Image (tube, rainbow, N blue to C red):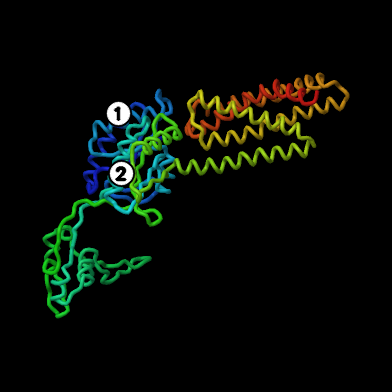
Amino acid sequence: TFILDYRTPPGTSLRETNRVVMQIGHILTTLPDVASYSRRTGLQLGGFLTEANTGDFLVRLKKKRRRSIQEVVDDVRQKVLAEVPGVKIEFAQLMGDLIGDLTAVPQPIEIKIFGDNYKQIHAISQKVVQEIRKVRGVVDIYDGVTIAGSSILIKVDNLRAGLYGLTAEDVQREVHAAVNGTVASEIQNKQYMTGIRVRFPLRDRHNLTKIRRLRIHSTNGTYVSLSSVADLSIQEGQPELTRENLKQMIPVTARISGRDMGSTLREIQAKIRRDISFPSDVFIEYGGLYHEQQKSFKGLLVVLIMAVLLVFTVQLIEFESFKIPVLILMMAILSLFGVFFLLRITGVALNISSMMGMIMIIGIVAENAIFLIHYIQLFRAQGRPLDSAIIEAGQVRMRPIMMTTLAAVLALMPLAVGIGAGAQMQQPLAIAVIGGFSVSAFLLLFLLPVFYQAFYN
């Protein structure tokens, strides 16, 4: 399952938006990998109302298909951009899009450009778009400029209004009552009261000629037309202003296809630093999922360090020696090389899920090492030589270690190869655990006895 977010030009009516996105629906029905889809217009997956020119598709894929989700998404992107001009699209996984709608930042890449001069930061945002378009794997680029529909601009002439005893506030109040209306009365429903709003008919509220003729009640009891005290004009679509911490900014966003987030952002940051010069009053920040991931990485790194320290402390209390805790900690850290190696050869990026697998490996390897060393010390306490005690302990613990390793590897293999619904979300975790377990079996059975003998011979 994946989400296709779409956006037609600002001011597009609901009927025209429906006509355009029907073409996207036709493209989806022609793909053999698509089982079904549903569509929303004017509504987000998170449940929030949006404009009539925005919405999304929820696309469900067949369980038995030849192509991966990413290959299907790339195919849909190419066909929509080629066959449906004028519509902007973005793709996301189901949970990622839902979280993004709720947090208002669904994109992995977000470059926030801050400044006091809108025209200045708008020009810089276009340069940023041109630079990141050159980066491999960056797709669905959005320049952050959302154009609202056309508006009627009313400029009150204080001199002319003053001749009739009117102020700009008086004129604004009359126009507001005509366009937005006032609640004149209420009617009783079964459970609540419903207001009766009196205002201009819909066809007149968007008619410049009708609004020019709007009668304004003056202080001397007469009526004057709105055009007598103000100048009216139609202003074409205006950009929506976005602020963060009271600072004006434009967020340039994009998604990533076929590449990990870390290397992509590093290349983007290098390009921006090298090719774009910023005025003294303009600065940028990186947000989006990348920013959230960096914060999560820091939190998990603290957890990983605490796990290592706690394991070391428990072993120190248990064995009353520094040598054995250092030896066990060495095996746990060396097993992480299996995690990095398998992530590397499979092309899976290090992320939150894989870091959770690393934390699991630290605890599991330490536990297996404790059992093996416990048996070595047990046999030594019975009076056996060091070499004999190490060999016999390895024979006793080899079957449990191999059974644990094989059970974990075989159980996680479907997730690691991406079989089943939602498997891709937990794939990094499965790969990390498989890599760590596989290397830890070799370390525990072959390397740990060698180091133990070196420490105590």
Q: Is residue 186 left or right of residue 342?
A: left
Above or below, 233 against 297 in this view is below
Q: Which mark is residue 455?
A: none
Q: Is residue 381 left or right of residue 317?
A: right
Residue 435 falls in image quadrant? top right
Is the residue marked by circle 1 packed among few (<14), some (14-19), or many (20+) residues within 10 Å? Answer: few
Residues under numbered marks 1 and 2 in contact, where contact means CB atoms less than 8 Å apart: no
Which residue is under mark 2? 124
**Residue at left offset 14%, top offset 80%:** 220
**Where, quadrant-wise, is the C terminus in this rendering?**
top right
Q: Nearer the viewer, residue 57 or 355?
A: 355
Which residue is under mark 1? 30
**Residue at left offset 31%, top offset 32%:** 77
Above or below, 105 against 259 in this view is below
Measure the C-alpha gap from mark 1 to mark 2: 40 Å
Residue 270 falls in image quadrant? top left
